[in-house]
Amino acid sequence: MKRAGLMACLATALFATACASGSSGASPSSEPARAVPAESASPAAGGTARASADLGTDEILHSPNITPIANVPLEAPFDGNRSWNSDLAFQGDYAFAGNYDGFTVHDIADPAHPKVVTRVLCPGGQNDVSVSGDLLFVSVDDPRTDETCQSGRSDPSNASSWEGIRIFDISDKANPKYISAVRTECGSHTHAIAPGPDADTLYLYVSAAGPDPGSTTCPAPHDNISIVEVPVRDPEAAKVVAKPALFKDRQGDEEYGGCHDITVYPAKKLAAAACYGDGYLLDIADPVGPKVLRTVTDRENFSLWHSATFNNAGTKVVFGDELGGGMVATCDSSGHDTKGANAVYEITADRELVRHGYFKIPRPQGASENCVAHNGALIPVPGKDIMVQGWYQGGVSVWDFTDSDHPVEIAFFERGPLRPGLQIGGSWSAYYYNGHIYSSDITKGLDVLRIDDPRTDPAKSVTLKEFNAQTQYAYGD
């Protein structure tokens, strides 16, 4: 979902009330996972027994190679009308789920029976999360009265408004502790962790849109990202150390700039940036001095460049388009297969970006179901290019882009439309982590899916200690 200002996306009206406390910890196993029935299974991916658009409210449909095994619903204090789940991060036996009201720590040691360790109440628009060691970083893209978890929404014209990155100590998973915060220009819609020159330094590439008319926190022009340096041993000293103006010569709307998502691939010294009007390939050999290698545009098919994913070899990058900002039903039967979709770009030897095929889920959704390409990442299958991705109410899709010109869906999971009164829902993000797929459903909580398919089974041998989708790692040969 994008920041209000580019289109009407409700981001400026998400929080009318200040939070009551900084951390609300539910005791371990206080919220048991719900068993999920394998209902309405389709005979094959892409060929459903029932049409997706005809599903009943919350009715489950999935391909036979995916089994939903658990769901952890949202509970108090995340039970408000805007307590929307956002992005996920993973560490060891834990999954961290962002929420517009804070974040949840899940124990996933037994994926079929995940447990809530704690829910931390700390409102702030988006609240995308990432983890590294004992630190958790949270993106706040919403002007607040101050940086604390007790803050309320603020008028962006107020010079004292704050938005940016919050930092928590998660050494005790049951009792995360707020450490500090860093104000960043135009806030932080998302961020990516880039390693520093040694283990004691991390950098956060902060993405945010802007400028916002009348804002003191997001003035014009906004053609840069913010780079935050985090001393791991002294995170309270984290600060902005660079604001490279990477996007001076670009973008469709001259009055709007910044970047939505940046994915870094440290092993290749590359980053891919999806920046509203264009896509970028960046050289990050110097992590505080990234350089633009290539820029690509697609005015005909792309409306909102939203996210980017490299293949493992670093020879391709998938850019996704969030047409309508996540609020619109773009997956209907209109036949616009390249709108609100993914595009596969191959990276040539001289680092040109050459567009090949498009991918969009092949299951038309109903006219009331917000659906568009959203957050996903690779499934670590050596020698293949396969990723899993959230599509809001289009559900979770697993698709293979090994053949760049002819990507194809190989598995899926989805629900029918929301109950009346809800306007946005579905899978915000879906990732493969240590043998299972985890989906952050905006209104339903955490879904756990098992995929059994010879095309993805090799990934079951890969075990990770940490996983942040916007920091890619290399696997296999």
Image (cartoon, rainbow, N blue to C red):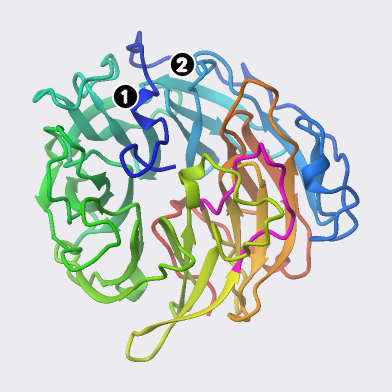
Q: Left or right: where does residue 380 sit relative to residue 239?
A: right
Residue carrying label 1? 177
Mark 2–mark 1 Cα distance, whole angstroms, equals: 11 Å
Find the magenta span and give its range: 359-375
- Asked if one can make out residue 89 in the rendered structure from this viewpoint, the answer is no
Dot 2, crowdedness within 10 Å: few (<14), some or many (≥20)? some
Lower sequence index among marks 2 and 1: 2
Q: Residue at x 27, y 46 (%)?
A: 208
Q: Residue at x 50, y 28 (%)?
A: 84
Q: Main secondary structure of the magenta part?
A: loop
State yes or no: residue 362 in magenta: yes
Amino acid type, mark 1: Lys
Residue carrying label 2? 25
Image coords of residue 321 (percent x, y)? 48, 58
Where residue 455 sits, quadrant-wise, is bottom right
Image coords of residue 295 (percent x, y)? 30, 74
Q: Left or right: where does residue 334 sit relative to residue 150?
A: right
Q: Which image quarter is the N terminus in?
A: top left
- Asked if one can make out residue 410 in the rendered structure from this viewpoint, the answer is yes
